[in-house]
Amino acid sequence: MGFKPKQIACLCLGIMLGSCQPEVEKKPTPTPVVSYEQHRPRFHFSPPSQWMNDPNGMVYYEGEWHLFYQHYPDSTVWGPMHWGHAVSSDLIHWEHLPIALYPDKLGYIFSGSAVVDHQNTSGLGQNGNPPLIAMFTYHDPVGEKAGDIDFQYQGIAYSNDKGRTWTKYENNPVIPNPGIRDFRDTKVIWDEEHQQWLCVLAAWDHIKIYRSDNLLEWTYLSDFGKEWGSHAGVWECPDLFPITLSGSQKRYWILLLSINPGSSNGGSGTQYFVGQFDGTTFTLDSTFAQAFGTEEAQIPAGTKFADFESGFGEWDVRGEAFGAAPTTSTLPNQEGVQGYLGQAWLNSFHGGDGATGELLSPPFTIERDFINFLIGGGNDKLKLGMELWVDSRMVRNAAGGNNDKLNWIAWDVSEYQGMTAQLRIFDTNIGGWGHIHVDQIMFADEAVRPNLEKAVWLDYGRDNYAGVSWDNAPNDERIFIGWMSNWDYAQVVPTEEWRSAMTLPRTLTLVETGLGPRLASNPISNLSSLRQASHKLPAGPLPPALELPFFPEGTEMMLELGIEEGAWSIELANSLGETYEIGYDAGQNQFYSDRRTSGKTDFSAAFAEKMHVAPRLTSDTTMKVHLFFDVASVELFADDGLTNLTDIFFPNEDFLTATLRYQGSGGTLKKGTVWSLR
Ligand code: FRU
């Protein structure tokens, strides 16, 4: 259908005068029809196909934001790691580029970072242009399988064509392994203050800092972290950078650190530390140090189901890994095992990591609300661990933290009261951390409260892991992106063409709070370019239920609430009766996210076992809430980014409606706007 000449004239005039109706029929701007696979995010980065985990090599150079990522191009589960690649001019619209780094004879390409070598200190630049230098971890699967401990070391690659092609440095590795089994995830920065390159990496339960003048030769400087923060899992993906406290001249240094498992709501998560760096050592800020400490485990009385002190009892034992009897001392080639009770425990290291085996408990009836037990060893729940089976379904599972320390875990099994159940303890993992420890299985009326090392978390949701910041960002901005998933279930989430997405890019700032300096994460400001129509909400007392505008393909909300008591929440729903809820409970002074009835949840027992909670860090009478809903995720930025919560979900049909609910009295909606996103 073409325009008639008269209409064209009128259209032009209409633009100039803003008039001319009703002669021209107003048509909405046509939007291209794009079809998306179910659960494919609309405004979050996701790989074109196959597996993705950590963001890597993030660097800004000549108008382009580079995002590399852990990628396995042959499957939707983790495998030999490559670096996938994409670029963007605005951090929102991404162009996929060919794979940047392939595994080679030194190993898979694990996580790492990239920098612009402005002064060509490495000498790897060409024609007077600075090279891009990527520094990453090589993971040698052959050494790992052979039972070596030095199979992770650091290498570099360089590019002289704006990141399009990369050459591995001929003298790799540039940091050899010093005899530490988990030794990975290099983050490099230029330390302007001390005129040196710094590299931080994770070494099992702490970080190591190295320095260099040329990015090729590295000298060890110091360790940090054995005494601070949570060690409930293995330390991974550190980031270290200076930052100025908002509203002052005061400079601090921030250390971001991901751990898996052991995050605040379970599985993978990112903690951070605020301190100073003197050119050699990172030291915790004294106010910030007050946030730490240990709470001892509290073990409720109960009925002992198995402690393996007098053998396997009636358990059915298969394979070699668990030996001929429960273990009473550390096995050959196994470092000290800690945390078991009594003399004996189950240890599947008979025959080393390569051995496999399984134990099935005699069937039992669930009569009490909790099963409490000690577990340690490998963390890959798909390949090993302990599972609870009820009605031919696996309803709970647990594994260790990639260390030889047994920790308490509690399973709430109240919903299975009266039903017959069986425990399965198995080890099919023949690679690194291919063994498991179990002890002291108890039935109790209360959950055990594990030994807790307090930590400060960047995000309290279950789905923000391994995030670090971009190098060389303009205006000294610190922009962060994380992997929007969790190792507890990342490999089994119900997407078929690809697996996982990244969080929204976030600006990190350091702000003073009643508790001392804390990081605030907020969505980058140009995300507002995605906004389409805005809908103002009526200010006033909060009714018990208020229907909000909602756009399945992308909704942003900014609310200002006055809540002194009660609880508010936003509930998403679809026509199948599936719901997801995010809110705040004034009684507990915490935000919460509940995906237990959000649709597909049974692909993993860990996905929807409980609500996720996040503390509120201010007592401002106005609570600011900023929310982004994509088809399969929510991101909460509360109180100007002081509390973050990122969670994913998989409804069988996209959510269609949102309702703001309030239980309590005196609550008000002071202000509110909802946007549909392009
Ligand atoms: C974090 C991590 C890193 C490692 C990478 C391997 O999720 O385990 O420690 O480099 O993933 O893909």
Image (tube, grey):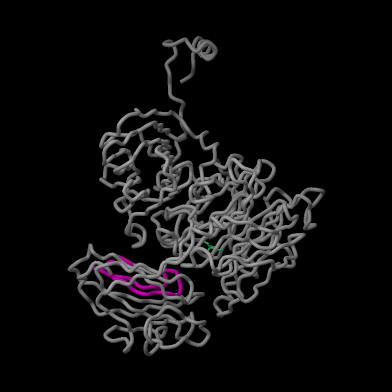
Q: Is residue 497 visible?
A: no
Q: Against 655, is 110 above or below? A: below
Figure disc tally: 0
Q: Please name whichever residue, 241 or 617, is drawn nearer the observer in this view of the structure.
A: 617
* x and y, in percent, of residue 442 in the image: 29, 75
Task: Farthest residue to the left: give it.
Answer: 418
Residue 456 position (above or below residue 377): above
Residue reaching furthest right?
127
Nearest the camera: 280 or 528?
Answer: 280
Is 382 magenta? The answer is: yes
Q: Quadrant of residue 106?
A: bottom right
Magenta residues span 371-396
Q: Residue 547, position in %: x, y?
A: 30, 34
* Res 652 visible: yes
- Residue 493 in magenta? no
Q: In the rendered view, does 175 fall on the left or right side of 503?
A: right
Q: Majority secondary structure of the magenta segment?
A: strand
Q: Residue 332 location in percent, x, y?
A: 51, 88
Direction from residue 46 to residue 180 in the image, left or right: right
Q: Write down which quadrant ligand 1 falls in.
A: bottom right
Residue 490 in the image: state x and y as whole percent. 44, 59
Q: Is residue 28 above or below residue 229?
A: above
Q: Is residue 541 left or right of residue 437?
A: left
The foreground one among 44 and 2 is 44
Q: Quadrant of residue 607?
A: bottom left
